[in-house]
């Protein structure tokens, strides 16, 4: 399963499961085919509520929180994303204590190459859009800072695998007007 398909399935399953679990008994919520039209309608209403609430929260953060704190909040989300998704942890596990193995593990989902003391991670030469389900909402003002989440996820993968701090820079992202998402990991 590629990264794009993973994110699409995760979002669909996650939203459905979370919303369904609030109102529908667990055994019924695991099979979307068993949901009645009323239950599906309730899930859709809850999905919109959650999307709007998240937009309001992120816009409020953008209005009232200083830049440094905003970045720290998104960094926390990036670490959480690493901890929540097994394929990201698997990259770090496969590359444990070995940069070459780490780069090979990354190649299953990303373009990656090394140039001396830098490692480039890119989401293809051109991306059709942002892969993050949260960052796709154009009504969220903090769109450019959401890329700090992804930057931190890559930083966490490298630090977990290699057991030491790594600086990761954003070269370009789709959310910041780039043609793709491209990050650089500093090895020294």
Image (tube, rainbow, N blue to C red):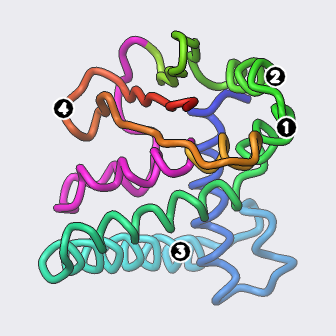
Q: Which segment is the magenta one?
A: 125-154
Q: Which residue is mark 2?
A: 101
135 in the magenta segment: yes
Determine the secondary structure under disc 1: loop
Q: Which residue is label 3 attached to?
A: 43
Residue that sits furthest to the front in the current view: 188
* Few, some or many residues within 10 Å of mark 2 (<14, 14–19, 20+): some
Which label lies toward us, 2 or 3?
A: 2
Q: Earlier in the sequence, mark 2 or mark 3?
A: 3
Element on which disc 2 rests: helix
**Mark 4 — residue?**
177
In terms of sequence position, does the residue under pointer 4 or pointer 3 come before the other?
3
Q: x, y (%) of residue 183?
A: 43, 30
Magenta-colored stretch includes residue 142: yes
- Which structural element holds mark 3? helix
- Residue ID at (44%, 54%): 149
């Amino acid at each position: 399963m590629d990264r794009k398909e993973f994110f699409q399935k995760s979002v669909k399953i996650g939203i459905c499961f979370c919303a369904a679990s609030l109102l529908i008994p667990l055994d019924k919520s695991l099979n979307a085919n068993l949901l009645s039209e009323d239950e599906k309608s309730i899930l859709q209403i809850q999905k919109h509520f959650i999307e709007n609430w998240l937009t309001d929260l992120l816009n409020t953060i953008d209005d009232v929180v200083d830049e440094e704190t905003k970045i720290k909040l998104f960094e926390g989300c990036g670490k959480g994303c690493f901890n929540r998704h097994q394929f990201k942890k698997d990259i770090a596990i496969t590359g444990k204590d070995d940069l070459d193995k780490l780069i090979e593990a990354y190649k299953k989902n990303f373009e990656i190459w090394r140039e001396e003391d830098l490692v480039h991670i890119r989401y293809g030469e051109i991306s059709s859009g942002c892969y993050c389900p949260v960052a796709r909402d154009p009504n969220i003002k903090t769109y450019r800072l959401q890329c700090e989440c992804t930057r931190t996820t890559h930083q966490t993968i490298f630090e977990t695998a290699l057991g030491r701090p790594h600086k990761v820079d954003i070269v370009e992202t789709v959310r910041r007007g780039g043609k793709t998402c491209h990050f650089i990991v500093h090895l020294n």
